[in-house]
Image (tube, helix red, strand yellow):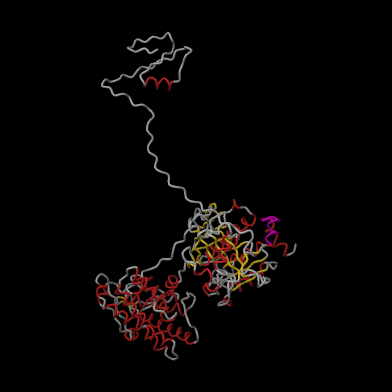
Amino acid sequence: MSTAALRTTHAKAILGEELYARLADTKVLVVGSGGIGCELLKNVVLVGFGYITLLDLDTIDLSNLNRQFLFRKKDVKKSKCMVAARAAAHFNPNVKITPIHGNIKEPQFDVKWFQQFGIVLNALDNLDARRHVNKMCMAGQIPLVESGTAGYLGQVQPILKDKTECFDCVPKPTQKTFPVCTIRSTPSQPIHCIVWSKSYLMGQLFGEDEDAVGELDEAEKQGENAQEIANLRKEAQAFSAVRQALRTTNAQDSAAKMVFEKVFKTDVQNLLKMTDMWRSREPPVPLDFDAIMNGEFVFPAKQRSSGAPAVNGHSNGIKVSPSTDSLKDQRELSLKDNLSLFVSSVQRLAVRLQAGEEIISFDKDDDDTLDFVTASSNLRSYAYGITPKTRWEIKELAGNIIPAIATTNAIVAGLIVLQALNLLRGSYSSMRTTLLQFKPSVPLNAVGTCPPSPGCGICRDTYIPVACDPSRTLLGDIVKAALGEEHAGREVSVYEDKRVLSDPDWDDNNARTLQSLNITRGKFLNIVDEDEERATISLALSSLPADHQPDALPFILPDPLPKPPRKVKPPAPTPATPPRSSLKRSAPPSDDEIEPSSKRIKSSGAFSQSPSKKRRLEEDGLVLLESANETLNDDVIIID
């Protein structure tokens, strides 16, 4: 038997001839080629999918090599999807793999582009991108298998519009945020210093030239300390000279010291003038550049007695000797070590700015930015009496990293393919949402899929694909055409993402083109019924076909036009039912105690009544005779 035949024998035996033949003609989109993506690509190639498109924006980092087995050390800094496609092609020469190095949210990857695929497999670690792919699959009616891992935990969810809940049916927890004044003026935890260094200081020095006015305005509206906010405004304006020095040739040596003096000395001294702020908390300590470099800087006695962090390799006068066996990133850095790292990282970043980089953002895999965040956050921790962190710990916290486990990725990738096969063969009753959990006795938990959430703002919309020329299409025209004659008179509001474009009382934009409103290919127009009787109509925009006539309408709608269903209104709450009163008649009031009557023995006469009827008559004070000859010795009134 040939090698090619051996390669497919087991897959055919397990899947069956019919399904295996379908896979060879199925186009599958794999989004992501990282930890899950490498394992998943290997699986879909070996199972026999004929046409695979692999899309990823990321490049290979040295830290990826321990679990992303398709990459080698020589591939570092290269495109993940390009290298992965080349490596996986050797597993099955009959498979065609098309790698695309790009962002899945780019406009050319619109709904029409998604609809060429028979199924989409997600292997992403980015919440925003996962939501985007989910929406595209809902709009294009494309089966999707969603997945994710977090350490030893993992999950796989098959998604099919109108049959299962989508990724957005269940609300996702929002990322934790911190008050502006806590981050900028009164940190009390290492994470406060890391967020300050990554999100504030990094942007002020190497990002866009902004003074965070909008952020401070919002904080002021929310009632944060007005005096602190006014001080922060002055602080933001003072960065202009420092930014200029970083971008001036041959000034990077002095720029590092200028940044340090501004941030860790002058700003701290200004904060100390606000005495009210430090009545109930320990004040920070201004740092001195030259004293630290010369090994002469000493913290105040009060901070040392309260357990201050190590200073120049000393803690409370005791020498701290870093272990020679410790890895570089896990070594504890002294105050002087952090200052040296700060100067070095600022100089390296300044050289990059002078070489033409306009904006430098934090990236956990960028050594220059990671060194800067490590050093600056630790220096701030020293100033505020907070325990500093190692470079490795800061990388995890700043990069929101959850350690990746290769075995978890492999298990999840296998489960993705199993659910994909259920979707393709139409075995919807066999689909399962599978959870990989931290329970040795039950490591896998498979539960049936849930129906769509009636209130979901993604999968409950009515999607209409629209090919259009945004430069010629007017907002009012396309909305009127999408509503159709049946719903032409309805009052609607029109949105693009979170922007309001028109409503029943404001239609100024109806005469403007979509392009003038920055609504182009790949975006969605949402038409919302103001009476909340019909579902939202979502127009998915794509480009006109190449053979579209110039004098024809600038947009093409499907025929027949999908009709938005009526919204299912929740049932009115049921009023509380009053307690049911007893049907028994209460006994008449009497001063005499009534003796219980003895049981009567049923005679063999022809006339008889049911016990229940007889009992009711007795309760009414009547005695029912069993026969006409029966006599009573009691004092009774005989009724004819």
Look at the image and tell me in which quarter the C terminus lies.
top left
Instruction: Please state the total of marks drawn on the protein image.
Output: 0
Look at the image and tell me in which quarter the N terminus lies.
bottom right
Rendering coords of residue 94 (x, y %): 70, 67
- Does the segment drawn in magenta span residue 162? no
Main secondary structure type of the part rendered in magenta: helix
For residue 464, side relative to residue 25 (left or right): left
- Can residue 418 be seen here? The reply is yes
Is residue 190 shown above or below 257? above
Q: Quadrant of residue 158?
A: bottom right
- Can residue 446 be seen here? The reply is no
Rendering coords of residue 355 (x, y %): 50, 87
Give the camera-side residue of 394 and 319.
394
- Does the segment drawn in magenta span residue 18? yes
- The magenta-colored residue range is 13-24
For residue 566, side relative to residue 43 (left or right): left
Is residue 47 shown above or below 182? above
Q: Quadrant of residue 55?
A: bottom right
Rendering coords of residue 622 (x, y %): 37, 17
Q: Residue at x 61, y 74 (%)?
A: 82
Rendering coords of residue 317 (x, y %): 29, 77
For residue 549, side relative to residue 146 (left or right): right
Q: Residue furthest right?
A: 1
Give the camera-side residue of 500 and 612.
500
Q: Residue furthest bottom?
A: 250
Q: Residue furthest top?
A: 629
Q: Quadrant of residue 134?
A: bottom right
Is residue 102 shown above or below 417? below
